[in-house]
Amino acid sequence: MKVLKFGGTSMADAASVSRVADIVQSENANRFVIVSAPGKRRPSDVKVTDMLYACHKARLVRDDVSQEFAAVAERFSAIADSLSLRGVNGFDLDGELENIKSNIDGGADADYVASRGEYLSAYILAAYLDRPFVDAKKIIRFDSEGNFDEKTTFGLCRAVLDAKVGAVIPGFYGACENGAVKTFTRGGSDVSGAIVAGAMNAKIYENYTDVDGFMSCDPRIVRNPKVIDVISYRELRELSYMGADVLHPESIFPVRSRDIPIRIKNTFRPEAKGTLIVPTEKLLCGEYKRKNLPLTGIAGKRGFLSVQVEKSMMNNEKGFARRLLSVLEEYDLSLEHMPSGIDTLSVVIDKHGVEKSRIDGMLMKVKSLLRPDRLEVIDDVALIAVVGHGMNRRKGMMSAITSALYKADVNIRMIDQGSSELNIIIAVENADYEKAVTALYEMSLELETK
Ligand code: ADP
Ligand code: ASP
Ligand code: MG
């Protein structure tokens, strides 16, 4: 049995939905299908999920959101009409839209409203394929603290899905114990697919998107980067966490412990081999063959803050690091990296969604609690991860990185070699981000030929 997940671009319009249907029907084998909400049809377009969040936001400030909702309804109606679904027995898109609109008018919360993109997307595909529709609310469960509850979810999946082989299921959301809809973080349909694959013990989890596979660098920065044939779960997690957003970083957990491989494939070029993601040990012991590359991939993100605390003899001051971390905890800031020297300790913090007042409060507290000799704050830092199992066997990796960045005239603000030796993190100024990624990618191609 296979699980197939189709992302937003694959569900964006009627033409892409019919490609999805062809892929689903191309084999007779059993499969479950997970879908995202319709994504962008062209670069300037808006994803349905973003339209729904906007709808919810508008409803918070005024009663009438007919205009915002009409735009969402129009996206789904156009798909259903082009696929000639109107006359299909039991298919009632207008009834579904009406019900959703009345819940939004009644003040439904953001998670419910956002989840309706996936709900309607699955509703339409199920009708088009004439397969059962299973609401994710019935099978994916969060506990009373809002954490994903794997045990209950797996039990529900087996109880419900065993009798619904071939079902189409909306991604991105599930329900709390009280029945309220709850979503994963953005891009979470990847996680839903992995959960169903894990619960149903799939042979493989195929994740269909709009590129030929997981690439060794961000295709929005470097033109036509190489597609990675085989990658380990650990390499993938490092790269996706650091910004290679082709797959949600949490997607590997439900499948990793069950040895279920993931294959990233292109809906628009299903004949392309894609990328196979396999258990780390199986890759390292040679069960899966791949070329001996100096590094597997490069990924990165902008928008971090680096705080360097300098104090002579800090190593003699017991509990120094713990106190620094307790300040981050007090201000609810998440720590990304913590490189250290003899008299210095740095913390790199993710600034996404953090108000300035929280950062200012944290810095004041660090000064008063730790009394550093010097506190250097570097705002607007980008982090780049250079990842690969091959790196720990290769001499001169660090010097290749630093000289590539030197030649590209990029100032390195920090380097941190992860304890796993799988990962080197480089911090550069936000403005240098693309230049640095390009230089590192070119360096990796040069190393390959040596
Ligand atoms: P979907 O809607 O199918 O879930 P996403 O937009 O979430 O698709 O992910 C696919 C996109 O990820 C690609 O179109 C590409 O621009 C981007 N991307 C970023 N880094 C990478 C990478 N290393 N390899 C492939 N794609 C990447
Ligand atoms: N539609 C959701 C999003 O845009 C979830 C997903 O696409 O995976 O984030
Ligand atoms: Mg995605």
Image (cartoon, helix red, strand yellow):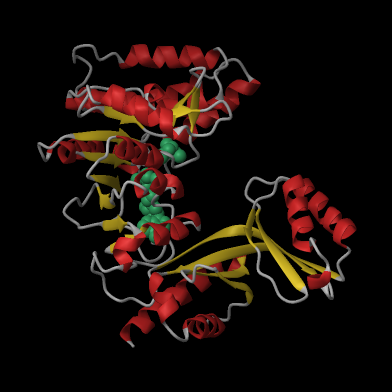
Q: Residue furthest left?
A: 28
Above or below residue 118? Residue 320 is below
**Residue 369 found in image quarter:** bottom right
Classify residue 20 by image quadrant: top left
Instruction: Left or right? Give the position of 364 relative to 405.
Output: right
Q: How many marks?
A: 0
- In front here: 365 or 114? 365
Q: Residue at x 26, y 34 (%)?
A: 33
User: Residue 375 falls in which quadrant of the image?
Assistant: bottom right
Left or right relative to 150: residue 193:
left
Residue 442 is at least partly visible in this image? no
Vertical placement of residue 86 versus 140, above or below: above
- Quarter holding the C terminus? bottom left
The quarter of the image that holds ligand 2 is: top left
Residue 445 appears anywhere in the view: yes
Residue 424 picture location, percent across and down: 52, 71
The residue drawn where x is 36% and y is 49% is: 256
Q: In the rendered view, does 12 fall on the left or right side of 429? A: left
Find residue 99 and report its horizontal and vertical position in percent. Answer: 42, 12
- Asked whether 83 or 24 is in front, the reply is 24
**The N terminus: image quadrant:** top left
Q: In the image, what residue occupies the spot 33% across and 57% down? A: 279
Foreground residue among 194 and 57: 194
Q: Position of residue 4 (x, y in %)?
A: 26, 40
Seen from the viewer's position, the closer of residues 302 and 288 is 288
Residue at horizontal 32%, vertical 40%? 198
